[in-house]
Image (tube, rainbow, N blue to C red):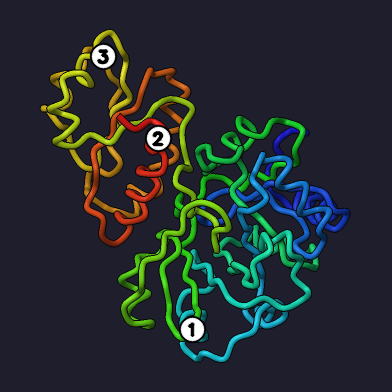
């Protein structure tokens, strides 16, 4: 199937496919999602198959109306309602005890489900027309770069998928995921909402990063979000590692910088392509550009990607989370 530009006709076609138990790639404000009827176990199984996603890694349910939340979860904590009122629609996912109507395949057998209401009119209309919550991880092969436009989806998953093109994603990073258990809130994945904003409502969050089998939410595995070519985070240790520096000889590097040029790194590279996430130092702009620039480096066929760290506060925490997981499989 070709990529379908968003209009009333393509939206209706996408909704019909969801109702029939088929897959649709669609835009949200965070990244493009690979969606299926979240109450249809057979349809959801197609997501795991298409992505080569391990069955122990749970999915996020997407809803189009705040009032629909209690159809799928139960809770009594009033602070959760405050989070919803403040951040929905938006890039905040909540992990809460699930109702029986939610299939176990969505939650990977967990008794909780990750759920959110996206801040994207196309996504909201699609969910509404489909008449069901849509289960959707990012629309890419498992572990690879997240897609922030329709072409990224096609490159990763192929042209045999219905892709609803809604342009570039506004946020460009996956949602922040917050869990609630035993009277305490925890950060399961940093994302499009800075935790400092969330903590104004919840109080201090505990940081939970459960790696390995049976994660509570997406984005908790040790490596993820990786480009097809090696990515390294440059720091003082790597800059003093002679073996690493020697390995850069005769290589073309993709150099990903935050705000400005870095003469120390550039002086040791024989050949490089440079991209700056935000020349004004705007973290929101940097986050929106992160996956796009990594995809661009792949198109340019560089041999490796070198990136400098950013301050891990605000959206910088989410940016560094993605970079560290992307670099995990390529550790020096």
Q: Which residue is mark 2?
A: 293
| 281 with respect to 68 (left or right) | left
Q: Which one is earlier in the sequence, the residue at label 1 or at label 3?
A: 1
Q: Which residue is mark 3?
A: 271
Q: Residues within 10 Å of mark 2 (few under 14, many from 20)?
A: some
In the picture as drawn, the residue positioned furthest to the front comes out as 213
Disc nearest the viewer among 1 and 3:
1
x and y percent of residue 44 in the render? 76, 54
Using the numbered discs, state the Cα–Cα distance from disc 1 to disc 2 in whole angstroms.
40 Å
Q: Which residue is mark 1?
A: 182
Q: Residue at x 33, y 58 (%)?
A: 315
Q: Residues within 10 Å of mark 1 (few under 14, many from 20)?
A: few
Q: Residue at x 78, y 59 (%)?
A: 37
| 21 with respect to 4 (left or right) | right
Q: Nearer the viewer, residue 203 or 25?
A: 203
Using the numbered discs, state the Cα–Cα distance from disc 1 to disc 3 in whole angstroms.
53 Å
């Amino acid at each position: 199937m070709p990529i379908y530009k968003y209009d009333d006709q393509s939206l209706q076609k996408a909704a019909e496919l969801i109702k029939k138990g088929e897959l649709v790639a669609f835009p949200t404000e965070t990244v493009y999602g690979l969606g299926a009827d979240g109450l249809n176990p057979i349809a959801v199984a197609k997501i795991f198959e298409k992505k080569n996603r391990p069955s122990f890694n749970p999915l996020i349910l997407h809803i189009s109306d705040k009032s629909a939340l209690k159809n799928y979860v139960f809770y009594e904590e009033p602070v959760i309602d405050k989070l919803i009122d403040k951040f929905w629609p938006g890039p905040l996912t909540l992990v809460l005890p699930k109702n029986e109507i939610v299939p176990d395949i969505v939650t990977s057998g967990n008794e909780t489900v990750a759920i959110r209401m996206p801040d994207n009119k196309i996504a909201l209309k699609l969910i509404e027309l489909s008449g069901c919550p849509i289960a959707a991880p990012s629309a890419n092969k498992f572990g690879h770069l997240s897609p922030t436009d329709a072409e990224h989806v096609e490159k990763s998953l192929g042209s045999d998928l219905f892709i609803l093109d809604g342009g570039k994603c506004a946020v460009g990073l996956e949602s922040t995921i917050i869990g609630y258990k035993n009277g305490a809130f925890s950060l399961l994945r940093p994302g499009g909402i800075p935790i400092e904003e969330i903590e104004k409502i919840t109080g201090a969050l505990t940081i939970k990063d459960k790696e390995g089998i049976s994660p509570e939410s997406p984005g908790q595995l040790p490596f993820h979000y990786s480009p097809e070519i090696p990515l390294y985070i440059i720091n003082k240790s790597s800059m003093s590692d002679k073996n690493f520096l020697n390995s850069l000889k005769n290589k073309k590097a993709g150099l990903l910088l935050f705000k400005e040029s870095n003469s120390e790194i550039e002086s040791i590279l024989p050949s490089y392509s440079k991209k700056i996430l935000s020349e004004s130092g705007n973290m929101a702009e940097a986050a929106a550009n992160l996956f796009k620039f990594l995809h661009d480096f792949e198109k340019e066929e560089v041999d490796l990607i070198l990136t400098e760290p950013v301050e891990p506060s605000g959206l910088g925490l989410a940016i560094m989370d993605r970079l560290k997981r992307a670099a995990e499989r390529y550790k020096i």
